[in-house]
Structures are given as structure tokens and as C-alpha cells.
Image (tube, rainbow, N blue to C red):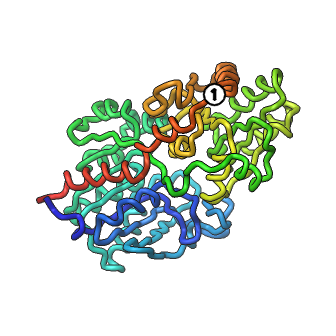
Amino acid sequence: MKELKRCNLLVLSDKYPHAGDQISASFVKNQIEYIKDYFKKIYVIALAPWVPKFMSRFSFMDNKGRYDGYAQNYSYDNVEVYFAKPLAFPFEFSRKRRGDDSFRAAVNIIKQNEIDFDLIHAHFTHPSGYVGARLKEIYDKRLIITVHEDRDWFLREISSGDKELLYSWKKADMIIRVNRRDLKEFKKVGIDESKLAFLPNGFSPNQFTPMNMSDAREKLGLSKSDKILLNIAALEPYKGQEHLIRAMNNLLRSRDDVALFIVGKGSMKNQLQSLIESTGHPDRIVLAGGNKSAKEIALWMNSCDLFVLPSISEGNPTVMFEALGCGKPFIGTKVGGIPEIIIDEHIGALVEPGDFEALSIALQKALDKDWDEDYIIEYAKQYTWMNISADIVKLYQSVLPV
């Protein structure tokens, strides 16, 4: 079997943190942090599209307000990061071309920088998996694709009949899905189960570790007497915050010692704020903003009594593992890979998605329950990136030629 320490890994991801950005798509970088020591060199090509500045209101921005299109290449340790920046416009024809445009941009980076690689790992099916499949054909290298997509998104891909998606999966030497339940779906598109693997996401214990709750609250300026519920997620419909706000409104009818903080940014911000105002409890239900550093997120995690994720659809949310790593009970919904992780009443509780009344009841019970923080922390240890990455490395070794 080929010795990895002599090999170079090429990682493809639709996004990757800028040099000074510790938030955007950080789960890929966190994974690499534990993989990089196995390889001679790791090259990362971020495929985030370049949007013309005059159309900047359509573009993605990092936590410092910089446009992804102007991201600068950088390196650290044995990792080199390149931003492909394929041209993109916010129109349908541009989205259809994204796979081919991203492929051409990636090839240019490989040629210009004389990148030599032995293995490709693509995160998400499109455009990264598609680019990886085409690079595999040209360079005759092995390809692994991790399918991170939330379940609704993934099922749409399966049923779409999209040729680029099918091409990507069929060309892959191994496909990693972040929840076990979806592996059977690949049979519908003719993917052999021998090249399917389940590996969940993980968390970085160096960032998400238990700390004193009072200290965390003091640093954030939060009440030390309230019971605090915390949600950290994009403010988008599939994350279900509107159902959480309604559940919280129910909860506040019977108790006044609870506060909910929602950390994140997204298209639902104004709608959610209006819903909060309509409850009459803007002091108890608070949108706490986005663009938080990893250090701030860890403080928020350690400040709460319960972590709540009322998603309508998920793959296997990294934030769940981070909450468990801080010893926090997880209250969520029966979607994606969440029921495969929240497997007993000692680490959390799950309800059906969209049922705010059931969520309200679950939160009431959880607030009155005496949770064993040590038990939760011990359970979470199996999901550190160190452990998950060791399993990923075994997959790398299994696909590399002798």
C-alpha cells in the first residue's frame, strides 16, 4: 500500500476560509488540520465564484466584509490554498456553467503552480465533485467525494437525473455520506454499495471544550440567572428558526426565566425579527447577529443550558457535535443524520420537524431535567476531528494504488 507521507493530496471545496477568516466553511479546514500530518503536501483549491464588484450585493462575503472574489492565496504548515474564482453572475445560465467554469479555473491553477498530486478529495458533489471527476480523467488519479448536502438537497440531486451529478458519483472511487440512512439512495442511480462509506462530521476539541458557564456569560454580557437556549445556524428557511420562536413563545407563557439567543445571518433575518416582535418578547428572544469568530462561538456554546437546532432538513450538522463537545444537551429534529447521533435521552431529545408545539414541550422537559454534562462530553469524544480524520485516512489508503 502506498505510503501517504510520500503523497500529495488535492482538496476541492466550494468554499474555504480566507487567511484571516476562521468562520466560512471552517469544517473543511478543521478536517484538514488533522489530515495534513499524514501527507507530504496538501493543496486546496477553493471554487467559490468570482462576482463582479458592481454586482457585489449578490456576492458572498467573509466575516470581515471582503468579497470571496478577491481572496488571496496563502499557505500554512504543509498546506497551500488557492482561490480559483471562476466568473459567475447571479443568473440561471451562469449556474448551469459553474461546473465547467470551475473545472477550467482549477486546471489553470494546477498548471500555473505546477501542482503535483496523488489523490483528490472533493467536498460536496457540485461543483467540487464534478471538477474532481474531470481531473481524475485527465490526471489518472483516485477520487473521493464527501456528500455534505442536507437531506432535501441530496434527495433532489438523486431524483434530478442531472448528468453532471451522476458523472461525478460514478467516477468517484469512494463516496462518503455524512449520514448512514442515505447510503441506500445511491442504489437508485446505479452506484455500487462497495464504494459507499458513512462518516459523520466532527468537531475540534481545541476550540469546543467545556468552560465555566458563568465566565462565558460574563464575557458575553449575559444574565447569570436565566436559563439560556441557544441556536447557531444560518437564518434560512430550512433551519427552522421560525418554529423555534413559536415554541419559545409558548414556553414564555408558563415561565419567565428563559431567554433564547439565535446566532447567525441569512435571508430570513427581517422575517424572523418581525415574528419576534409579534410575540411581544423581544427582550427574551434575541437575534444575536452573525460573523462570530470560532472563539466567540465557543463562548456562546458554553453560556447556554440547552442547544436547539429545529431544522427542517440536515445532512449531519457540525454544530451538533460542537455543542455535545461542550457538554450541552442537544434538542433538535428527526432529520438527516441527527437521529443517528442523538441516540438516547441522556444526550438530548428530538421531535418531528416543523412541530413547534412538540418542540415547546421537549424544551420544557429539557429545562427541568438534571443533565449529566460529563456523560455528554465523554460521548462526544468519538466525534472529534482527530478520530473522524483517522477513518478518512483509512479510506484514502484503501483507494490508492499499491
* Along the viewing direction, whichever of 366 and 141 lies nearer the viewer: 366
Residue 240: which quarter of the image? top right
SS of the residue under disc 1: loop
Tell me: 374 left or right of 103.
right
Q: Is residue 139 above or below residue 346?
A: below
Q: Position of residue 128 (x, y in %)?
A: 39, 56
Q: Is residue 353 above or below residue 136?
A: above
**Residue drawn 25% across and 60% down?**
136
* Along the viewing direction, whichever of 89 and 349 lies nearer the viewer: 349
Q: Position of residue 142 (x, y in %)?
A: 23, 57
Q: Which residue position is annotated with label 1?
A: 370
| Residue type at the position of mark 1 | Asp
Q: Say whether residue 238 is visible.
A: no
**Residue drawn 25% across and 35% down?**
190
**Residue drawn 65% across and 19% down?**
358
**Residue drawn 62% across and 52% down?**
298
Residue 371: which quarter of the image? top right
* Along the viewing direction, whichever of 171 and 162 lies nearer the viewer: 171
Q: Position of residue 312 (x, y in %)?
A: 57, 31
**Quarter in which the C terminus is drawn:** bottom left
**In the image as oriented, which residue stretches furthest toward the left?**
402
Q: Position of residue 266 (x, y in %)?
A: 67, 48
Q: How many residues crowd around disc 1 within 10 Å: few (fewer than 14), some, or many (20 or more)? A: few
